[in-house]
Amino acid sequence: MMRFEALRHDKRAAIAATVLIGILLAVAPFLIGSAAGSTWLRIVDFALLYIMLALGLNIVVGFAGLLDMGYIAFYAVGAYMYALLASPQFGLHLPMWAILPAGAAVAGIFGVLLGAPTLRLRGDYLAIVTLGFGEIIRIFLNNLNAPVNITNGPQGISGIDPIRIGGVSLSKPIDLFGFTLPSLHAYYYLFLALALAIVFVTIRLENSRIGRAWVAIREDEIAAKACGINTRNIKLLAFAMGASFGGVAGGLFAGFQAFVSPESFSLMESVMVLCMVVLGGMGNIPGVILGGILLTILPELFRHGAGPVQQAVFGKILLDPEALRMLLFGLALIVVMLYRPAGLWPSTRRRREFKGGAA
């Protein structure tokens, strides 16, 4: 009887926590907008995009244990799919509901194309190959303007149609029952809804047979194959699923920015997304979300605080503010990984591994 009462209490506590988090997420844009201004609300919108990217990469790195250093390529594929199909570049202005699935599908195909030649590679070798793939995609987009201009080269594609839902453009304030919803707030709720959908799909995948097969491959691929797991198909599925999430985030990025160029998809972006997964806690969905939030917010905090810190610490020594920002950011990462090598919010299995216990 006491155990039953304890279970009921835990269930009520979980429901209350879920309701509280839901209320906070619903009012967050108004609180942030009134307290910190539209600049920080825009940063929060980008944080939601990075959370989608980190969740997609977590499938490849966290679940399947495949070190992917070129993940930003799928982000670029989704962004350019949206840009080409919803801009004056080709004269096409397709709706969002048609472009986003197409971008996810094409990014998933690119994920399979990346995964197929690398099935025998692990660790550092896989990282080098995927890094090269990411750079190839960026350079390809940068040079695809001759002899036929497709991507407009390094100038990028501008004039991209904003995201529309039911004919309503999110780039302008929306009137709802006499209440005006600012554009950044509307984008926030759209990105939040899609991020929650990706979280739901990821949780379902983690607790499925496919998710357990990914974990088996991550722990010991030879043993997984001996148990009857088709490691080839399961690894390709991990690449495809992770890439499709990146394609969705890329399409949202293009509609949000109304401009894309190859400079937005550099190697540093891949490193940042990988840091979100590793710093938050590989394989643990709440940890990955935490990592995505922190590594989007912290660099901006360092950007705004770089001037006072430089004056206080370095005195008259002149440092580039961007270099100082990255210096502070790098030091923060080093400190965290020294004292929390499993991540800020690791999974139970990974915490046991770092403590030397049984998994």
Image (cartoon, rainbow, N blue to C red):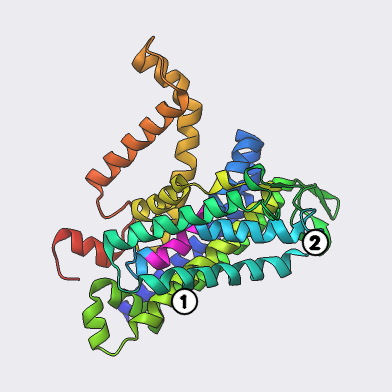
Q: Quadrant of residue 289?
A: bottom left
Residue 75 appears left or right of 94: left
| Residue reaching furthest to the bottom | 228
Q: Quadrant of residue 121?
A: bottom left
Q: Residue at the location (81% across, 65% down)?
A: 166
Q: Nearer the viewer, residue 351 or 323?
A: 323
**Magenta residues?**
50-60
The dot on residue 92 is 2
Kindly report the distance in space between the C-alpha atoms of the residues bearing marks 1 and 2. 36 Å
Q: Quadrant of the C terminus?
A: bottom left
Query: What's the residue type where badge 1 is placed?
Result: Arg
Residue 88, percent from left and from top:
80, 53
Q: Residues within 10 Å of mark 1 (few under 14, many from 20)?
A: few
Q: Quadrant of residue 49?
A: bottom right
On the image, numbered disc 1 is attached to which residue? 204
Q: Residue at the location (38% across, 15% down)?
A: 312
